[in-house]
Image: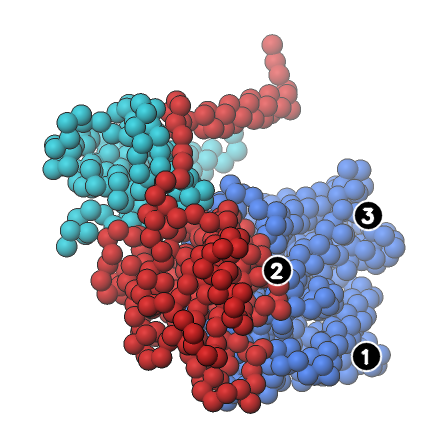
Chain colours: A blue, B cyan, C red
Amino acid sequence: MLEKALIGSRRYWGWIFFLLAVIGVGFIFYLRQFSYGLGLTGMSRDVSWGLYIGQFTFLVGVAASAVMLVIPYYLHDFKKFGKIVILGEFLAVSAVTMCMLFIFVDMGQPIRIMNVVLHPTPNSIMFWDALVLNGYLFLNIVIGWTTLSADRKGVAPPSWVKPLIYLSIPWAVSIHTVTAFLYAGLPGRPFWLSAIMAARFLASAFAAGPAFLIILALIVRKLTKFDPGKEPIQALGKIVTYAMIANVFFLLLEVFTAFYSRIPGHMSSFEYLYAGLDGHGKLVPLMWVSVVLAAVSLVLLINPGTRRKESLLVVACAAVFVSLWIDKGFGLIVGGFVPNPFERVTEYWPTMPETMITIAVWAVGLLVLTVLYKVAISVREAQLESGTDSSH
Amino acid sequence: MYDAGKILIGLIIFLAFATYPFYSNMGKAVAKPEPKLDTPVIQKMEVKKCVESKEFMRAEHMQLLNQWRDAALRRGERLYKASDGRTIQISFQNQCLKCHSNKKKFCDECHSYAAVKPYCWDCHFAPKEAKR
Amino acid sequence: MSISRRDFLKIAGLSGLGIGFSATDLLWKRGRADAVEYMPSPKGLTAKRWAMVVDLRKFRTEEDYKRVIDACHRIHNVPDFGNPKDEVKWIWTETFEHAFPFQRNEYLPEGIQEKKALLFCNHCDNPPCVRVCPTKATFKRRDGIVAQDYHRCIGCRFCMAACPFGSRSFNWRDPRPFIKEMNPEFPTRTKGVVEKCNFCVERLAKGLKPACVVASNGGMIFGDLADPDSEVREILKTHYTLRRKAELGTRPSVFYIIGGEEDA
């Protein structure tokens, strides 16, 4: 099937080469980081994780969100998702690829990466994270590819995929739970030390992932002959709505605990992020953009009239995505490190090379996504032409 | 065969890349590595013998170094009782390199020949640097 | 005879596995000469649980702190980058209110809030850094010292996020050009690894007390916490001491005497 990715329009190839060029530029910056060290980034002794780990965390959520299509379709027999489940699964493949690359570019000694396998350490959450991420990547590639090729031939998928599909559901939950455990079990970081972290991660994931998927589905409809359909998009819209409400609710629970208890350590990161601390407030404007976007998106999503209009739904989804990207891909990580263990403020802002490397990793993800979507959509388009539509 | 021309061109390009190391080195004589042992400390030794036999050291020195590292660092066992009964202080920098103070002629001689770049020197001082 | 592609692949896979297993077996047995033994040096100082008491009353002038910090940083080849972003440090000072944020109290005797404390790795009995390390590059030795294997560290910095005491530094770039005088007896570190105080394991193995203790003129006392007759236990019995963030349950092995009558 992969050969379908080699036949495409001029616009398709233009996009592919654009992504390759972005990757090339980022790779040159990575080579510089490789030889100079991570000092090329904005990270420091006090803020020792930054944009890379933030992106990793955010994208684990995007990857996990494929389950929001798998559950309705396979567990509740919600037939309307039949043709777009594959879009979710392939999005997961692309997102997990980016996660792994973000971990890799964040390593001080990347050539020693196999030490994690050579000296397996089950008491480290990082060990489990590597395990579940690799497993999830494998599951989604196998499931997505097998079901799509069966679909192409107009036959039912082989019976051995079903157990894998069922396994992928708790597995998706596990990748984001384990990722939350990276943070939620550290004694000296009160901002992260919260039992609701994993639940909040899942809520934000199930909002941001499907929001991105809606945007992708609309792009697919515009650019190709395959129409994901109005109803699946509306169903996804409802998922985004509930998940976003849950996410904001969970965030407010954190705010309550911190500010009603008035324990300084629990309040100070929030103060730094949303108001500034000791005269430092680099992230304040960004965090308020996130708040405003979250509010706008909730208004548009909760009101059925606006949610049903696709033109407004897509605005709401973009708002959800950007809001959560700021909140989770940036604020959550930096906020955990500010103030530092001595209650002093050291600020962080990504440098130019760091930003370029980040963009390049995104470009790799988009390239993987483009190629996989091209294959999936070519299969769907062929079905339309020959009229062999097996999903109904 | 369909697309025979394209396949053949592809094969030729592949072969050109795959055999690059062979034809690029063809005809070039590379001297056989001959690590030197003539350092002042070794010359003063009555019995010129390393921790273990020459053959063992030649084949296994990297494994031995790894074991020494784990013993000293992790278990705090900084003495090594060699197979001939001698007891030797474990330290790469303060033991191995005290005799083998000629990094270029001893370590690099074979390492360069075999094109391996051990990362010892990122942290441990090469003997020359220490003299300065 | 003909074999199908399927059978061929099966046989190829199995033989591959077989070769793989025999190769690991070979690697396992390699590198061991007969009848060798490893043992600790008889000259070395040993303990069940090393610990330190820092008597801040003995640190009166800037010079008192500097002498100790320099002694450590010089013998361990700790670089001085001259900027906070790249900073690497094993032992340093911080005012009381920042070193003990939970003990902040504006009515403390005069001078205590601003009094500088000497900070370094606490060598916790229950160290979060060891718990989170994905490669066992950082580990707790049997004598309680939390040590770091720079050969194995992959530079993920999980330990830096986990340490509640800010004891760990990362080599954001090559440290060598920033080491003023090199101590050829001790290695440097390389870029991309985490480092911290090691309670001078290399000196203990030679029978010497940690460099900071020697340089402190009695301001730092080192000994075995598990031995009821040790000097540290004597001091802990007769003085009120504080540990940093003890409420987090990491059980630090570094104790501080802040103020009061000086009787020693």
- Tell me which numbered mark, 2 or 1, is placed earlier along the sequence: 2
- Residue pushed farthest front? C263
- Residue pushed farthest top? C1
Is B106 on the left-hand or right-hand side of A345? Answer: left
Classify mark 1: helix, strand or loop: helix
For label 1, the crowd category at 10 Å Cα-Cα, with few meaning under 14, some 14 to 19 and many 20 or more, is some
Residue C257's x, y, as percent? Answer: 48, 73
Position of the C terminus of chain B, as image quadrant, is bottom left
Depth check, front residue: B118 or A378: B118
Is residue A211 in view from this perspective? yes
A235 in relation to A318, above or below: above
Is residue C161 in view from this perspective? no
Could you tell me how far apart the alpha carbons at marks 3 and 2 are, in whole angstroms? Answer: 43 Å
Same subunit, tags 1 and 3 = yes
Could you tell me how far apart the alpha carbons at marks 2 and 1 are, in whole angstroms? Answer: 33 Å
The residue wearing badge 1 is A302
The residue wearing badge 2 is A182
Tell me the residue at 51%/70% (across/down).
C239
Classify mark 2: helix, strand or loop: helix
Residue A40's x, y, as percent? Answer: 38, 67
The residue wearing badge 3 is A390
- Name the subunit of mark 3: A
Count of all numbered marks drawn on residues in the image: 3
For label 3, the crowd category at 10 Å Cα-Cα, with few meaning under 14, some 14 to 19 and many 20 or more, is some
For label 2, the crowd category at 10 Å Cα-Cα, with few meaning under 14, some 14 to 19 and many 20 or more, is many
Tell me the residue at 61%/50% (across/down).
A123
Classify mark 3: helix, strand or loop: loop
Tell me the residue at 38%/69% (across/down).
C219
